Image (cartoon, rainbow, N blue to C red):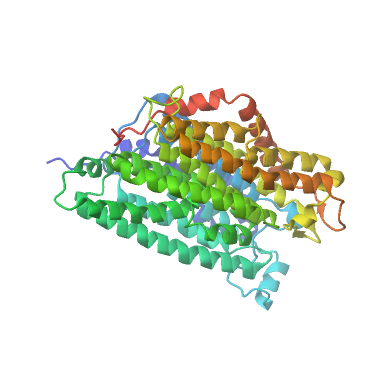
């Protein structure tokens, strides 16, 4: 039997992943061999080039063929939905790199501690700060995390998915604990994220073991074909499915696996929070869709009610707990939880091409929603870094009072992002919500879409409260909007333009994700 491997064909089939992984490896090498003064600029430039190339290669592969055959060796399914989500990761990865590079708002230094190994407040940390040391490894960690994300959402094998999950998660645990200010809070956030993440990974791995016991394979297509044919009871498969859902829903931030989200978002450096809020969600949702739709589509009658209940609980907690938040980063964390619930509405609907509105399926609606969510979320976190008092971020909403009078442009732009989160017409958020609710309706889950609409009205209150605080409260002494670098300004401007354009002219983006079609192998019948 010929067991030769076509390495050239394999590398071509997964070229975007290879580019990002090679870039991460070069970044690690640069960290080891370059003098300290040359590392930051080199790492920044390398990261930008790598992500531009990854986006370009994904776009070229997307346009060259309607679908791509799976390479058995790679254990990946590089289909159009995967390529579309890879492009989103590249775009929002670029946004995140620009935020990582920000120095001006931090007084000429980065958002990251000068010495992550030093005890907070110690002499060693002070000496590293005075020497202006920088943790340029943050770019390396970002690229490795993106590599895991790209593998995770395209994995056609459960073992590959688990390995990708760890590659994606481990750098995030480190990045969460590297804040320059409030280091103890940052380290607490990193520890919570690590412990809860490890627990969720254990559930995910145990679920994989049970599914393997039932099907005799880790490959998603084989698992699908084994349903109803195994000698084991169906309860083994359902138990494995539920345990895998624990690991997947944890990464998305779904209730009741959401407790890490507000603490980690608050304690992590704000650029890292922005990166996690968008890119982790893209990868986790992509992986969730692939497991449920490709491997376990025949079990949809078992997992759809579970997802529907989880979606309602998530929207409830995100909407009502968000109402009482007094910290802007915690408010945006509960906003992220709420948006995860909206996404789950479309996933539970499981609308296919045969019944989607104009061909808008659950896969395409979810992908479009991730785009509309990302273009507002990363710039919103970027603007949080610009409100400062004595060099420190002002995250308490009381400090945002009267910003509309102090800096009308800043407050107006932030208001646009808040309106998009709320789903107000003529913003990207409105079209995103329409897409996911329409997908649920077409999948026969109209009542769930109605619940989502009602709870989105509740969540809109705290977005409008931020706007009211900025424009209708008397200014307070101290907090000011400070000048930022061109990098952060580019992120905010691009996000603003995209939020408005997607709200007014959503057609091209919707058509793009509609043309992506379904996964190559769809298990649901």
The picture places residue 140, in percent across and down from the top left corner, at: 52, 54
Residue 361 showing in the rendered view: yes
Which quarter of the figure has residue 92?
top right
Residue for point 36% across, 24% down? 354
Which quarter of the figure has residue 34?
bottom right
Give the quadrant of the C terminus.
Answer: top left
Q: Compare residues 135 and 301 and report the one nearer the observer.
A: 301
Residue for point 68% across, 57% down? 110
The picture places residue 491, in percent across and down from the top left corner, at: 66, 41
Residue for point 58% across, 26% down? 506
The picture places residue 174, in percent across and down from the top left corner, at: 53, 62
6 w.r.t. 173: above or below: above
Left or right of 438 in this view: 225:
left
Q: Compare residues 67 and 342 and report the one nearer the observer.
A: 342
Left or right of 454 in this view: 511:
left
Q: Compare residues 42 and 357 and report the one nearer the observer.
A: 357
Left or right of 431 in this view: 364:
left
The picture places residue 223, in percent across and down from the top left corner, at: 24, 45
Marker count (numbered): 0
Give the quadrant of the N terminus.
Answer: top left
Q: Compare residues 130 and 342 and report the one nearer the observer.
A: 342
Seen from this angle, which residue lies furthest left? 1
Residue for point 55% across, 57% down? 261
Residue 274 showing in the rendered view: no
């Amino acid at each position: 039997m010929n067991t030769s491997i076509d390495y050239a064909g394999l590398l071509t089939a997964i070229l975007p992943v290879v580019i990002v992984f090679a870039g991460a490896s070069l970044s690690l090498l640069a960290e080891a061999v370059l003098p300290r003064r040359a590392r930051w600029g080199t790492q920044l430039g390398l990261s930008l080039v790598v992500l531009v190339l990854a986006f370009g290669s994904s776009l070229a592969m997307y346009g060259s063929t309607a679908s791509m055959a799976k390479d058995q060796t790679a254990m990946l399914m590089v289909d159009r939905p995967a390529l579309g989500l890879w492009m989103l990761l590249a775009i929002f990865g670029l946004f995140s790199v620009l935020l990582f590079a920000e120095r001006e708002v931090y007084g000429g230094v980065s958002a990251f501690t000068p010495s992550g190994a030093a005890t907070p407040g110690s002499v060693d940390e002070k000496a590293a700060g005075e020497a202006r040391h920088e943790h340029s490894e943050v770019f390396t960690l970002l690229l490795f995390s993106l590599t895991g994300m790209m593998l995770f959402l395209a994995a056609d094998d459960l073992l590959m998915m688990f390995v990708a999950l760890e590659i994606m998660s481990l750098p995030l645990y480190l990045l969460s604990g590297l804040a320059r200010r409030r280091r103890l809070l940052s380290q607490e956030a990193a520890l919570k994220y690590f412990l809860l993440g490890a627990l969720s990974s254990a559930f995910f791995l145990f679920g994989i073991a049970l599914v393997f016991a039932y099907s005799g394979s880790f490959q998603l297509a084989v698992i699908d074909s084994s349903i109803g044919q195994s000698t084991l009871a169906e309860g083994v498969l359902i138990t494995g499915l539920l345990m895998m859902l624990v690991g997947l829903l944890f990464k998305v931030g779904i209730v009741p696996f959401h407790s890490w989200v507000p603490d980690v978002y608050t304690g992590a450096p704000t650029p890292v929070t922005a990166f996690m809020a968008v890119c982790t969600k893209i990868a986790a949702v992509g992986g969730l869709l692939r497991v449920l739709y490709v491997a376990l589509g025949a079990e949809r009658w078992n997992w759809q009610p579970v997802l529907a209940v989880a979606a309602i609980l998530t929207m409830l907690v995100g909407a009502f707990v968000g109402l009482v938040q007094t910290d802007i980063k915690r408010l945006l964390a509960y906003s992220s939880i709420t948006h995860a619930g909206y996404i789950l509405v479309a996933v539970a609907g499981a609308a296919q091409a045969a019944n989607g509105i104009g061909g808008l399926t659950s896969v395409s609606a979810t992908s479009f929603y991730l785009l509309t969510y990302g273009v507002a979320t990363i710039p919103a976190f970027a603007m949080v870094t610009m409100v400062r008092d004595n060099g420190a971020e002002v995250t308490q909403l009381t400090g945002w009072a009267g910003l509309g009078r102090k800096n009308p442009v800043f407050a107006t732009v932030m208001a646009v992002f808040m309106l998009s989160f709320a789903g107000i017409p003529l913003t990207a958020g409105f079209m995103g919500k329409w897409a996911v609710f329409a997908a649920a309706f077409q999948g026969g889950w109209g009542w769930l879409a109605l619940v989502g609409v009602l709870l989105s009205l509740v969540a809109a209150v705290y977005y409008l409260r931020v706007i009211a605080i900025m424009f209708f409260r008397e200014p307070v002494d101290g907090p000011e909007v400070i000048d930022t670098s061109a990098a952060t300004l580019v992120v905010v401007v691009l996000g603003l333009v995209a939020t408005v354009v997607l709200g007014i002219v959503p057609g091209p983006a919707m058509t793009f994700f509609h043309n992506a079609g379904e996964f190559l192998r769809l298990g649901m019948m």
